[in-house]
Amino acid sequence: MNRNMNKFEKAQKVLHEINGDGWLIICVEDSDINSRFMLGVASHARHYIYIAADGNHKVIAVEMEAPMIARSLKNKGIKAEVVSYSSMSELTTLLSSLIKKPRIALNIGEDILSPNGTAYADQIRAGDFFSMKKIAPKTEFISAAPIINKLRSVKSSEELKDLRNVCKATIELLETIPDWVKVGMTENEVKAKLEYEYMKLGEPSFPAIVGTGAHSADPHHNTSMKKIEPGVLLIDTGLQIYEMCSDITWTFWVGGKPAKEFVDAYNALYESKEVAHEFFTDGTPNNVPAKRCREYLAEKGYDHEKLFFHGYGHSLGFEAHDIGGRISWKVPDNFRLKENMVYTSEPGLYWADKWGIRLEDDVIIGKGKCEKVTYNSKDPILI
Amino acid sequence: MNRNMNKFEKAQKVLHEINGDGWLIICVEDSDINSRFMLGVASHARHYIYIAADGNHKVIAVEMEAPMIARSLKNKGIKAEVVSYSSMSELTTLLSSLIKKPRIALNIGEDILSPNGTAYADQIRAGDFFSMKKIAPKTEFISAAPIINKLRSVKSSEELKDLRNVCKATIELLETIPDWVKVGMTENEVKAKLEYEYMKLGEPSFPAIVGTGAHSADPHHNTSMKKIEPGVLLIDTGLQIYEMCSDITWTFWVGGKPAKEFVDAYNALYESKEVAHEFFTDGTPNNVPAKRCREYLAEKGYDHEKLFFHGYGHSLGFEAHDIGGRISWKVPDNFRLKENMVYTSEPGLYWADKWGIRLEDDVIIGKGKCEKVTYNSKDPILI
């Protein structure tokens, strides 16, 4: 796509390709992340964004948020009329004038429970969908999946530049961890201190996972008031600056000499990633890097089916879990990596009630090679 | 309700009242807050919570999150089987066995665009709804609005205790603001410092709004890199500890003697709240406190229709915007306040491109009186 097109213009182009008259995003209390993606600002009250095939774009928002939205669009050079509503009947009239057209795209996912489905586009809520059907019973509502996919899965050169910046900033903060994390601090304190630094630059891209000891064996552990103890410390965290996120996991050893079985597993994981990264290339099926990683772990004697029970990586960008098929040995062959997609690379090995290790980096898919924009230490970092 | 019943048992009781066979919560990437409300832990991957009328409750989660969920339920004394799935076809089979029953409640909102609708229950996404219809075409799917309303709108004595605690902790932190906020710090730095303190105790209940100067005139301003300047500083922020949130706005004057028109407007707002609080009582229509506040502001010469363009208050609890009709002059008479509901009280006056003032407190509805669990200073606080 032409890099000088703004997001509204890009969406308008895809609308023409799918013969849509408009794309309506419905968002209330941050229910659809695509709102912030399109507006460049978070609007919390019920609002509607209408991208029109004929270019007469419109945003319908409450009076208390409309001026803020108008300013954000103006700053981005986007031409769209921002109108406000003060009652539900007024809102209904405004919507009616927009969606009584032959074909309107909504953020509906299709075949949610199929591996080839478009669950990623499924943002509109059931009641909202029914309300649209009621207002415009003759309109054909189609899925906006092709628009969302086009706008968000392959990154522009500007987005990749922002990605490199946010990854660099995150790594610089992670490198300070051994200087200030101490036995006896709570997991929450470690999270708070890290995210305090993030907030000076942007926002955490998700609540950091800080898992001490056996907590590290829960890949999605909820950071708690437990005190850091000697042994394994897993930190999975990311920063968002403007519109790009990082997502990184480092696994440390706290206090003294690390256990041999920890070091062995750490090294095997590190090496398995190196093997996998050879396949982070344009045109490769998404399942290949995961399979190569698992083969390597099996060679090293690890029962990967039991110990590594999650996917290998996910798309990364505007969201920490962004648009695009996962990298996993379970993904069908028809999912292929494309140049300038961005993925996490995060194999893990977990022993329940004991400890877990995950080494997560962020990688840009290239032609015949990839670009690692973050790094994990080759050897365990000691605290 | 019996205070010894756990949330699953309470939901089961309401299921009997509405002749439902089960209540299915579908959650992916935190799409339905009712998941964390029921489980006591945030699960991020696609998962399903099934509360059964016959007591055979079940949670279906991915392998990497199932043990964490099982432990949380056990800690809360909730009996539910936690099963994991590793493929979409396995998931479909599991769901099929649960929802092929006569009447299943889903988190669907009804009449979204009507003031008497149940948009608050609208959490399930359209594609997910279609997938349920496909799996169980003969099942009658009903809205879970009565269950959600019963569980969350009127607070238990334990929840009110937690509310008082979280409000006290928040106020203690807000009281320190004049000690450390300085001209020249960015809005983001002020937010970061405050939320760092929150994270030692819990989590921010929403991203703090820090608005300096003209930014204070945007009620939902997105905190930015702008530096604090002399004049108005509006901070709207809240803390969540375990399962209760605070939500408080203080408006400060930075640097020297405050402008007379600021002080006058501040005083009028403060007094208008005092008037409104007389009507924060069991059985009062939700629109009454808002009307009384606006009448007072009009008497004082403020054009409230132009300058106060948002609702008077919202329900507060597990979420900063919790379940329950708003307090607003525009809400129909049939919405009534009930004892032990919790509301924000947050009138504001905003002059575009100049400044805004909002004074927000949290209040428990009582019989013939209310309990203010936070306070705003009677006179503007100077920094």
Image (cartoon, coloured by chain):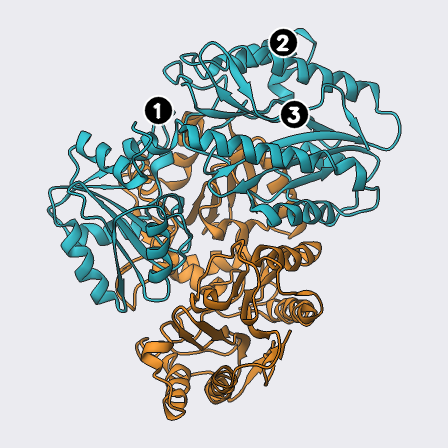
Chain colours: A cyan, B orange
Residue B101 locus on image (x, y percent): 35, 43
Tag on residue A296? 2
Task: Give the left or right position of residue B318, taking residue B100 as reference.
Answer: right
Of circles 3 and 2, the one toward us is 3
Q: Report the residue at 37% width, 77% height from top.
A: B307
Q: Which residue carries the number 1 mark?
A: A116
Q: Chain of mark 2?
A: A
Q: Chain of mark 3?
A: A
Of circles 3 and 1, the one toward us is 3
Q: Tell which residue pokes out farthest to the top in this image.
A: A299
Q: Secondary structure at mark 3?
A: loop
Confirm or deny contact between disc 3 and disc 2 (CB under 8 A).
no
Residue B81 locus on image (x, y percent): 56, 40
Separation (CA) of disc 1 from disc 2: 28 Å
Separation (CA) of disc 3 from disc 2: 15 Å
Please, what is the three-letter code of the amino acid marked with disc 1? Asn
Confirm or deny contact between disc 3 and disc 1 (CB under 8 A).
no
Tag on residue A359? 3
Q: Nearer the viewer, residue B176 or A107?
A: B176
Does residue B40 appear in the picture of this structure?
yes
Q: Nearer the viewer, residue B379 or B116?
A: B379
Asked if both marks, 3 and 2, belong to the same chain, the answer given is yes
